[in-house]
Structure formats: structure tokens, C-alpha cells
Image (tube, rainbow, N blue to C red):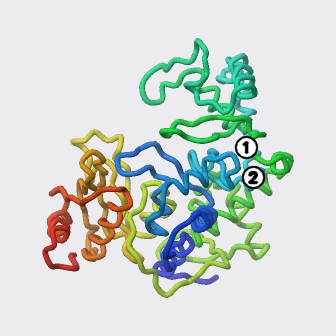
Amino acid sequence: MDVVSAALARRIALAAQGFGRPRPSAVGTRQLRSAVERLAVLQLDSVNVFERSHYLPLYSRLGPYEKALLDRLTFTARSPFVEYWAHQASLVPVTDWPLWRWRQQEYRENGLRPDSWSSQHPQMLDFLRAELAGKGPLTAADVEHDANARTGPWWGWSDVKTGLEVLLLRGEVVAAGRTNFQRSYDLVERRVPADLLAQEVSRPDAIRELVRTSLRAHGIGTVRDVADYFRLSQAETKQALADLVEAGSAVAVEVAGWNRPAYLDPEARRPRRVEGMALLSPFDPVVWERERALRMFGFHYRIEIYTPAPKRQFGYYTLPLLQDEALVGRLDLKHDRQAGVLRVQSAWREEGAVVDLDRLVDLLRTTARWQGAESVAVVDRGDLAPELAAAVAGTPGTMVG
């Protein structure tokens, strides 16, 4: 069995995720589509203190682009992508729709239990199907019904909203778009081509194909890594990987220091170096599986959005800082839209890391322009903040660590 060094495993993983490639001189629809297809999943999240999560992975890999292009690519009637519960709420290629039939069937079967919401609200589901058939696409707020009232803050959904989400999970309706991040819903047959709706794929075959896609996107990983990409069971993932190894579509390897079996995409690039600096979304595939981020990069990462402010260690919305082949820091960013300022609320350096301040300042200024901000301001919080503030102000100095 081949042994892969930890450093090479990092480079393989980053290259598989699209890092280390020359960036295009201009980013258009073709480049965006290619990048999303390579990732195979783009996680959505509503937090907008800096930028909505699904815009960030493409910025991290391609550089500045017009966000309206991604909106038109992903949230239109003939989009090559569709929203589904893949890795949380995510955009996935519409051509993969048959691969999710087994998950939709699971949700339908769960809805047959006497204590399920679906079993207790069949009239609501019938009402929503009829409303969408006659008036769709609709947001939850568009639906006129006595039960369309929130039951509390945050996730206190009305019965109308709950019903629409149930139908979405079952694959009967899809997200037709988003306005101010609020979903509109429509019948699946209006958004997914008929040939894809008619295509039948068995559960084992679908999971094997999803595992193949996950391994290709990761480049290298453990059973847990590969399973997490599409939130598959580890048992089914392990069997699928064994099938892929037998077929020559995966290679069993050892990675130094991992202390568990690993698998390699035989077509994965093995670059000698990966260069570039990028800020990563908390929901970027490079870091979204926290145990993998710790094992691969020595990076212990938690989102502190729901942590009370006095108990936060790093900040509300800290973004990992990728410098070449290492995660060297984390920055808590906020786009102050009223003032036109990109605020670095805190800046932290990982223990033992050397941060290239010149590149970081250049990245922050580029990010500010991409966001439509006129300047960058650094708050004095975090062990990297003083040097970063000085560098932003123009004081000489390139590397700190």
C-alpha cells in the first residue's frame, strides 16, 4: 500500500478543490459554472455580516467576479444547478437529481409515521401542491392561509413554511429562486428536465456515484471525510469505496500521521507546491468537516455565531486564512455597508505561522473592492491585529510570525 506524506496529502486536497491554479484574467459565467461543477456542491447560509457563504468559495478560487452572474447562473428557471439538501442546503448540478431520489424516498417514508408532521397535516400538503400548481412559483409569505403565521423567532416556522420544506425534501417541489435569501418554491416538473425525473438509479448505485464525486472533490480522504461531503452514512460510504477500489476508481493508501485508512482519487493532481492566499468561508469544503481540518492542517475551527459575545474566542464570523499550503490565521470580517468600510473585527495568527502581510493587505483591499467598500479598517483585537493595522496604514513590513 502506498504511503502519502501529510504535506502531499494537503497539496492533493487543495489542488482537487481548485486551489493553486492560475486565476483567469476575467471571470464570467463559464468560469463560475466550471468551478461549481468541480466542487459539486455549494453550501448556502443566510448569515450576511460579511458576505453570504455561497459567494465566497468561488471568490477564494477565482478572485473577484460579478455576483449577479452567479445569481443568474444558479437561481433561474433553466439553471444547470438546483438547490437540495446535499451538504445542508446546497446548490448541486441538476444532472445529479436522480442521485438524490433515495434520500427523497427516505423523507417520504419518514413522513408515513403516525407521529410525523406530514401524517398530521395531509390537508396542508395537498393545499400547497394545489397552490403551487396554480400560482407557482411562490414564497411562503405569498401563500394565503390561516396557518401562515410564525410560531416564534428564528426557526419558528409557520405550517405553510414547514409544509413547503417537507415537499422540498421529498423532491416534489424545488427552490425556484431566492429574494433577500427567502426561497420561492415551484413544482419540480417545472424546474427539473423530464428525462432526469424519469431516470431511476438504485440506492447503491447513487451512493457509489456520490462517493466517487466526493473523492474527486477531496482528492484524498478518509471514509469519514468522503461520507461528510454529501452527508452519507459511513457504512454505505465504506462499501462504495471498496467497490471503487475494486473497479480502479479509487486507491487505498496510508497518509503519514492520519492513523486511519485513506483513499486517493487516482486522477488527482499531485502538485509540488500550491501557491496563493485566500479567505475561506466557514462552509468551504476545505474546512467544513472540522476533524479533517484539524487532521490535515492542524487547524481547530469552530463557528462562534451562536456563542454569546463575551465567550467568543476569535469573533462572530471568522474566516480561515489560507496561505499557500497552510491555514495561517483567521480574520473576523464585517462589511459596514453604510460606511463603505471592510472592517477586520479581529485578526489572529496560528501558533508558529508566518503571515505574509503584503499579500494579506493586497487580498483585503481586493476583497473590499469586490464588496464595493472604499477602505479597510483593522480593529485592535487579536495577536495579528497590530501588525496588520500598521501594514494597512502603509508601515513597511512584510512577514510576521
Image coordinates for residue 103, horizontal then vertical, percent:
71, 44
Front one among 186 and 381: 186
The residue to which callout 2 is attached is: 99
Q: In the image, which disc is placed on residue 60?
A: none
Q: Nearer the viewer, mark 2 or mark 1?
A: 1
Residue shown at 39% from the left, 45% from the top: 48
Front one among 308 and 221: 308
Q: Is residue 38 above or below residue 47?
A: below
Image coordinates for residue 363, horizontal then vertical, percent:
33, 69
Q: Secondary structure at mark 1?
A: loop
Binning the other alpha carbons within 10 Å of mark 1 as few (below 14), some (14 to 19) or many (20 upward) gives some
142 left or right of 180?
right
Image coordinates for residue 107, horizontal then vertical, percent:
70, 36
How many numbered circles are shown?
A: 2
Task: Give the mark, 2 or 1, whose residue is nearer the N terminus.
Answer: 2
Image quadrant occupied by the N terminus? bottom right
Tag 2–tag 1 contact (CB < 8 Å): no
Q: Secondary structure at mark 2?
A: helix
10 left or right of 364?
right
Residue shown at 35% from the left, 44% from the top: 305
Residue projecting furthest to the top: 146
Q: Is residue 289 above or below residue 88?
A: below
The residue to which callout 1 is attached is: 191
Three-letter code for the amino acid on which mark 2 is drawn: Leu
